[in-house]
Image (cartoon, rainbow, N blue to C red):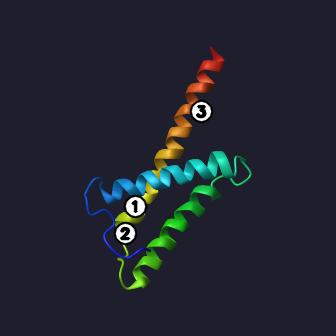
C-alpha cells in the first residue's frame, strides 16, 4: 500500500516477487505458524483470500492499481509451495517403503 514505484531498478519482475512472497507466506503459515492438519485446505484458501484483499485495497487507494495478474502470481506461489510439499512427501514415502 506504499505509494510510488514498486521497484524502480527493475531488478526483479513484480509477478515473480508476488509468487515468491506468497510461496514464503505459505511456508510460514504451514510450517511455522500452524503446523497442523486440522486446518487442511483452508490454509491456502485463506492465504489466497489475503492476496485478493490486498489487491482490492490497492484498487481503492487511488494511487495503486488492482491487478488480476498479481492475484494470479500469488496463487502460483501458493500452488508451487503445496505441489513442492506433495512431491517431497511422496519421495519420503517411497524411501520409507524401500
The residue sitting at 70% across, 51% down in the picture is 34
Q: Kindly state the secondary structure of the residue where label 3 is placed.
A: helix
Q: Kindly state the secondary structure of the residue where label 2 is placed.
A: helix
Q: Which mark is residue 72?
A: 1
Q: Is 14 left or right of 39, judged from the image as shown?
A: left
Q: Position of residue 69 (x, y in %)?
A: 34, 64
Q: Residues within 10 Å of mark 2 (few under 14, many from 20)?
A: few
Q: Kindly state the secondary structure of the residue where label 1 is placed.
A: helix
Q: Position of residue 10 (x, y in %)?
A: 25, 57
Image quarter in which the N terminus is found: bottom left
Q: Residues within 10 Å of mark 1 (few under 14, many from 20)?
A: some
Q: Residues within 10 Å of mark 3 (few under 14, many from 20)?
A: few
The residue sitting at 47% across, 79% down in the picture is 57
Image quarter in which the C terminus is found: top right
Q: How far apart, in angstroms, are the residues tagged by discs 2 and 3?
A: 31 Å
Considering depth in this image, is 73 or 94 the residue closer to the camera? 73
The residue sitting at 60% across, 26% down in the picture is 92
The residue sitting at 48% across, 72% down in the picture is 54
Q: Which mark is residue 63?
A: none
Considering depth in this image, is 68 or 31 the residue closer to the camera? 31
Q: Hey, which quadrant is residue 58 in on the image?
A: bottom left
- Up-down: is 10 above or below 51? above
Q: Answer yes or no: do the residues labelled 1 and 2 have beta carbons within 8 Å?
A: yes
Sequence order check: which comes first, mark 2 or mark 3?
A: 2
Q: How far apart, in angstroms, are the residues tagged by discs 3 and 1?
A: 25 Å
User: Which residue reaches farthest top?
Assistant: 98
Q: Which mark is residue 89?
A: 3
Q: Answer yes or no: do the residues labelled 2 and 3 have beta carbons within 8 Å?
A: no
Question: Which residue carries the number 2 mark?
Answer: 68
Sequence order check: which comes first, mark 3 or mark 1?
A: 1
- Up-down: is 39 above or below 35? below
Q: How far apart, in angstroms, are the residues tagged by discs 1 and 2?
A: 6 Å
Amino acid at each position: 500500500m506504499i505509494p510510488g514505484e514498486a521497484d524502480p531498478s527493475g531488478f526483479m519482475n513484480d509477478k515473480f516477487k508476488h509468487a515468491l512472497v506468497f510461496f514464503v507466506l505459505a511456508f510460514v503459515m504451514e510450517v511455522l505458524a500452524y503446523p497442523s492438519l486440522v486446518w487442511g485446505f483452508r490454509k491456502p484458501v485463506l492465504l489466497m483470500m489475503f492476496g485478493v484483499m490486498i489487491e482490492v485495497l490497492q484498487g481503492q487507494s487511488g494511487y495503486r492499481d488492482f491487478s488480476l495478474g498479481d492475484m494470479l502470481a500469488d496463487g502460483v506461489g501458493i500452488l508451487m509451495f503445496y505441489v513442492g510439499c506433495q512431491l517431497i512427501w511422496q519421495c519420503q514415502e517411497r524411501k520409507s517403503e524401500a
